[in-house]
Image (spheres, grey):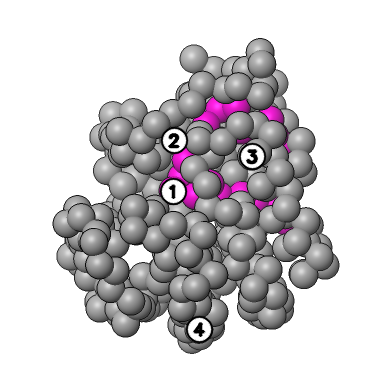
Amino acid sequence: MASIATDRSGAGQAAMSIDVEDWFHVENLKSVISRSAWDGCELRVERNTMRIMEILDACKARATFFVLGWVAERCPQLVRTIAAAGHEVASHGYGHELVYSLQPSEFRADILRSKHHLEDLIGKAVRGYRAPCFSITDWAVPILLDAGFDYDSSVVPTVAHDRYGRLDGIHAGHAISSLCEGFYEVSVSCIRVGRRGIPWGGGGYFRLAPYWLWRQGVRAILRSGTPYVFYIHPWEIDPGQPCVEGLDAVSRFRHRVNLQRCERRFTALLDDFGWVPLCEMIDRWKKKCAPQSAGAPTIGAHVRLPTNPERPPRRTPT
């Protein structure tokens, strides 16, 4: 196993991330809302994201906003406002396609379309990427590096999940990992259980767990000296979003559980801890830990595109 440097010096640092997509982009609704129907759905992402920025500002917190390219094309002023407020703008891809369902050429086109559009809007380089539904896979890493990204934040090193992807060599003990020279993986936080963990970085888990328990878990992660990474979607603070007919019970529960409580919990979380964007967390980690790992092998040596890059192994969610 290749060695991977992690930040365990002093107290950990907390990074906030926002996955900017609308309620109808969600994979849980895919069975009842087709991609062709998106343009006919009520657009609520702009006001919800603005509300999140109001809460961040009130709590003096800054965040990384992983913006879906589809949203950026329809709400360009929103992207400019995020950047002007001092937050980091990063890419969530363009079309919210699961990465492991794409061919490499399709993935490359998707991320470049998003990255170039976001950079045109904010006038600076976009450093980070997060895969829709955390569906990262090993063959995507060299493409991200070649496209000019500095980091990915798509691994949730949990025990099991029907949609999440994974990268070889990354486990719950690796908050920040150097995949290869100049490219980093920032994992979404888990409570470590061996090499895997219990998701403790946001989503339905945050909405479902009692807040006092969630706060204790965050404190435990930070006390260990490990960076903490949280994520939320703008639609999660919007209990008034449309209710979709024909959805199975599991998907409905996953999507709507405790939406009415989420904004209060999110505000409490921002108040209870200090927050920075992911780019600042990485830069701090590089200064403190990279010199310690000079000359050490990284898992980047094991990340390769398939022999036939147009036909990677497809993965079907179980």
Dot in front, 3 or 4: 3
Label whose residue precedes the other's in the sequence (3 or 2) = 3
Query: Label 4 amino acid?
Result: Arg
Q: What mark, if any, has residue 314 been given in the picture? A: none
- Looking at the image, residue 147 sits to the left or right of residue 277; the answer is right
User: Mark 2 and 4 residues: CB-CB less than 8 Å, in contact?
Assistant: no
Separation (CA) of disc 2 from disc 4: 30 Å
Mark 3 vs mark 4, CA separation in Å: 29 Å
The residue that mark 1 highlights is 133
- Circle 1 or circle 3, nearest the eye: 3
Q: Which mark is residue 107?
A: 3
Of callouts 1 and 3, the N-terminal one: 3
Quickly name the residue at label 2: 165
* Label 3 SS: helix
The crowd level at tag 1 (other Cα within 10 Å; few <14, some 14-19, many 20+) is: many
Q: CA distance from mark 4 to mark 1?
A: 22 Å
Distance between the alpha carbons at the discs numbered 1 and 3 = 15 Å
Q: Where residue 150 sits in the image (x, y, percent)?
A: 70, 44
Relative height, residue 125 to residue 273 (above, below): above
Verify whether residue 131 appears in magenta. yes
Local SS, label 4 = helix
Between residues 212 and 154, which one lies in front from this camera angle? 154
- Say how many tags the image has: 4
Q: Amino acid at mark 1?
A: Cys
The image shows residue 283 at horizontal and vertical percentages of: 67, 51
Which residue appears at 54% of the width and 17% of the height?
2
| Residue identifier under label 4 | 47
